[in-house]
Image (cartoon, rainbow, N blue to C red):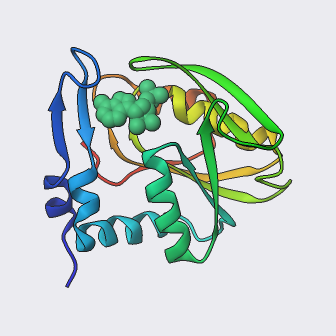
Amino acid sequence: MSTSKADALALIRVVPDFPNPGITFKDVTPMLKDAEAFATVVEEIASYSESYDLVAGIEARGFILAAAVAGYAGKGFVPIRKSGKLPYLTHSETYGLEYGIDTLEIHQDAVLAGERVLLLDDVLATGGTLKAASKLIQRCGGTIDAVAVLLEIPGLGGKAKFNKEFPNIAVHTVFPE
Ligand code: AMP
């Protein structure tokens, strides 16, 4: 038996004023705890493209999705991490996000020239995080096959901002508005 997307969406908890006043935080942990809901999401994301070699996830919740999709699809996993966490040579991108500024890094050899990457995160807000992660993959020489998120924060125009900079990369949303 599998869970419908509507039932999976209903498990995502909305937490007002976290981590800062005015931010409506989308907490995916109850959905991840439900094995069938998690499986529904993983299968859907894995189907967005068939031509990827690697699944990249953005620290921290993107790791959970990307590792699960990579395992399901039989692909390798690439971590895109916050500054100072990766031990080897890195590429680095600093960017603005809905509640602050951050830096993301990738190992320089994590994606080889020509490798195709499915890039995942949990939530798309302003789009800064996904843009920075996409630039990191491209700086390695990789190609972004597609991007996927569970949810978009309405009213921030994140998808449009991303597509302005990356017009040829499809952004899939598991739970569109
Ligand atoms: P942005 O760069 O503005 O698109 O922000 C997206 C990143 O911040 C993702 O890694 C999300 O996990 C996190 N994020 C931003 N806003 C929210 C929110 N309202 N609820 C949950 N996560 C969020």
**Residue placed most toward the observer, 43 or 87:** 87
Asked if residue 135 lies left or right of residue 69, the reply is: right
Position of 165 relative to 32 (above/below) = above
154 left or right of 114? left
Q: Residue at x 64, y 29 (%)?
A: 83
Q: Residue at x 17, y 33 (%)?
A: 15
Q: Residue at x 83, y 55 (%)?
A: 112
Q: Position of residue 89 (x, y in %)?
A: 83, 40
Residue 68: % across, % down: 47, 67
* Residue 153 appears in the picture as rendered: no
Residue 108 pos. (x, y %): 82, 44
**Screen quadrant of the N terminus:** bottom left
Q: Quarter of the image holding residue 4?
A: bottom left
Q: Closer to the camera, 170 or 14? A: 14
Let me know if residue 165 appears in the view.
Answer: yes
Rendered view: 17 above or below 151: above
Q: Residue drawn at (39%, 18%), measured in percent from left and top? A: 99
Q: Nearer the viewer, residue 49 or 16?
A: 16
Relative placement, left or right, of 14 versus 99 is: left
